[in-house]
Amino acid sequence: MAHSVAAKSRAIRRRETMVAYLFLLPALAVFACFVITPMVMGFVTSFTNSHLGGSEFVGFDNYIRLFQDPKFLRSAWNTIFIVLIAVPAVTAFSLWVSTAIYRMHATVRSFFRCVFYLPVVTGSVAVVVVWKWMFNTYNGLFNHVGTSMGLLEKGIDWLGNSTTAIWCILIILFTTSIGQPIVLYVAALGNVDQSLVEAAEVDGATNHQTFWKIKWPSIMPTTLYIVVITTINSFQCFALIQLLTSGGPNYHTSTVMYLLYETAFKTYQYGYADAMGVILALVIALFSALQFKVMKGGTTE
Amino acid sequence: MKINKKSPYFMVCVVLLIVLAILFMFPLYWIITGSVKEKSDILLKAGEAIQWWPRAATSVNYEKLFNMQVTWELFGSSFRLPAAIKWLYNSVFISVMAMLLTCVTASLAGYVLAKKNFYGKAIIFGLFVCAMALPKQVILIPLVTLAKTLGLSESAWSVIFPVVGWPFGVFLMKQFSETIPTSLLEAARIDGAGELRTFWDVVVPIIKPGIGALAIFTFINAWNEYPLQLVMLHKTEVKTIALGIAGLQAEMSTDYGLIMAGAALGAIPIIVVFLVFQKYFTQGITMGAVKG
């Protein structure tokens, strides 16, 4: 009797498995073909000198060459610099905006949320072309306003100057990065347990205290999620650079992702470019794993 | 929480927020006004006041944009049409196809990952999650090789499939499917409903808001997936509107009126889509985040 019950439940499970895989098939097929396959291909190619003419196995040569390549080292430093500035700025600013708007009237709140999301929706190309015009030395808004107000003696070549160019990129990256964190923070702040907040207020806690002692800990998972996605996005910063400065002047605004693009699609050194991709993926994966670990530790406390 | 609306801190916040909101909307304003300005209003001369508002709206930039034509081969016959319109059509085609395919594949997969017990479930879900933590741009080069091998070069499908394959949708739909009461699924089974019928009549109505969120999310993402479009599509007639604008900038870098006309044409449709469906969109972003 017991034996047949077990056999029956196994038969059910087998049937469930078959049905499940039928349902999964379309998603899995596209995923395997257009995500997993290219990942494996990229990894394999990174050990070859693949170029337009052919491909030969070269072992770790590409990786060794990377760390002796001044262009790569400069791009790696720029990438790290962008991440180090953008992640704290985006996180702190979106938290401030969210705490300011989440208690406002629903219409006002959704107005602000939309406004800060606008640059994301507009798309990097449209956003960049208008910023590029505003930054232009001769016809740009910034120089015109700056000189007519007497702030600037003469027009600055914002994008052609190695110190200002990277900040121009950071400003645009910032405006296109805060939309999603604000949406997430507003939702998280709305989910904070109100009874705790009220209890604290009855006990005479100041706004400052309720924020740091109650709300901040309870939105911690959201904060970590925001840090992770902002880091991944900043590490991949590419479209802005390709459209705004093409990495210039003299690779001062080049990032690893931009250099990868240039190496693969301008000089056709696929193997070498794939090695950059593998390094970038490893660094991002390591960072994500670290964040997830911290996040898990934070929530089980 | 009591809000002291009169407190100086609150007032400062409100003022700052309004200033920031204006700054964030300004680039869009500058695109739209720039697109209807005469050349003399666009090129700023030292000592002259800036034309914050176009002196007289002109359609000259749009006329110039629509004068650039391409040939479209359709059902054996070919005809000429403005390149910008073809680019818009290409963007719409890519976004709609990516949206439809993602919704179908992700809701089927998300449902079984949330509600069925089967061999290999943990491995498959783990694969999806791991892939999501990796940067999607690093696979651009192999994707180009792959598209060539599959005969998808210069085809919209070379952009559509990688967007559909990205596991975020599966992940999002799994989150939504967790809310389906198991008792409902059992009731359907006892009533003799088949698996597909159960999915269509019981599951889909419940996860509809999720599908809505995913649809709008995928549409906007596919529309703005510039790096992928950049490496896949090169011919004028297959370009998307984003590539078209980038091309305008590369070729006529100082004809700002023309570039802004292109930018307006690319930005306004997607902003309208966003504003109409923003409720779903917000839901998609927040649902995708809970429980990393």
Image (cartoon, grey):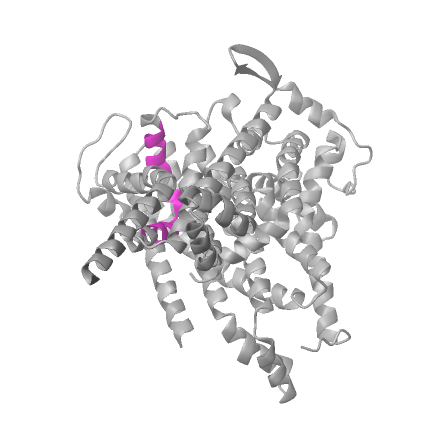
The secondary structure making up most of the magenta span is helix
At x 51%, y 52%, the residue is A163
Quarter of the picture holding the C terminus of chain B: bottom left
Q: Furthest residue to the top?
A: B77
Magenta region includes residue B142? yes
User: In the rendering, at what x and y percent does residue A161 appear?
Assistant: 52, 46
Q: Furthest residue to the front?
A: A1
* Left or right: B144 as drawn, with respect to B183: left
Foreground of the two, B124 or B150:
B124
Residues rendered magenta in the picture: B127-147
Image quarter of residue A62 = top left
At x 60%, y 14%, the residue is B80
User: In the rendering, at what x and y percent does residue A74 appear?
Assistant: 38, 49
Q: Is residue B36 above or below residue A177?
A: above
Q: Furthest residue to the bottom?
A: A203
Quarter of the picture holding the N terminus of chain B: bottom right
Magenta region includes residue B228? no
Residue B7 visible to the viewer: yes
